[in-house]
Image (cartoon, rainbow, N blue to C red):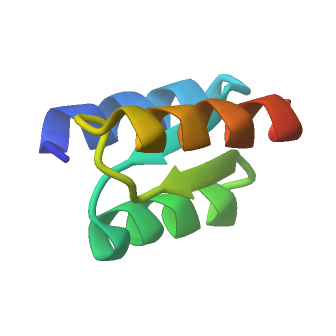
Amino acid sequence: MSAREGAAARVLAAEGATIVIVGAADAAGALAAEVERTGGRACVFTGDLGDAAERAALAEMLTELF
């Protein structure tokens, strides 16, 4: 995840958006924790979006959450 993407996530979370972070577990988890510490909502998906089964798993996760 780039610094620009992280900054965008922080701004959107501050405006009330729920953030879905897709990326490496360490970086995604750190950003999610930061968003939640500032009162936002975030969830993390660490799958490979190049894989159809993992895209389906992400869609299922989002359907359950939202």
**Looking at the image, which is closer to me, 27 or 6?**
27
Q: Residue at x 13, y 43 (%)?
A: 2
Query: Where 60 sits versus 48, above or below?
Result: above
Query: Where 57 sits versus 56, above or below?
Result: below
Tell me the quadrant of the picture where the C terminus can be found.
top right
Give the farthest residue toward the front.
53
**Looking at the image, which is closer to me, 18 or 12?**
18
Residue 4 falls left or right of residue 22: left
Q: Residue at x 38, y 32 (%)?
A: 52
Residue 53 falls left or right of residue 1: right
Q: Residue at x 68, y 25 (%)?
A: 17
Mark count: 0
- Residue 62 position in % (x across, y down): 71, 34
Give the farthest residue toward the bottom.
26
Q: Residue at x 23, y 35 (%)?
A: 50
Residue 14 image-quadrant placement: top right
Residue 59 image-quadrant placement: top right
**Looking at the image, which is closer to me, 50 or 10?**
50
- Residue 13 position in % (x across, y down): 60, 34
- Residue 7 position in % (x across, y down): 31, 37
- Residue 51 position in % (x across, y down): 29, 39
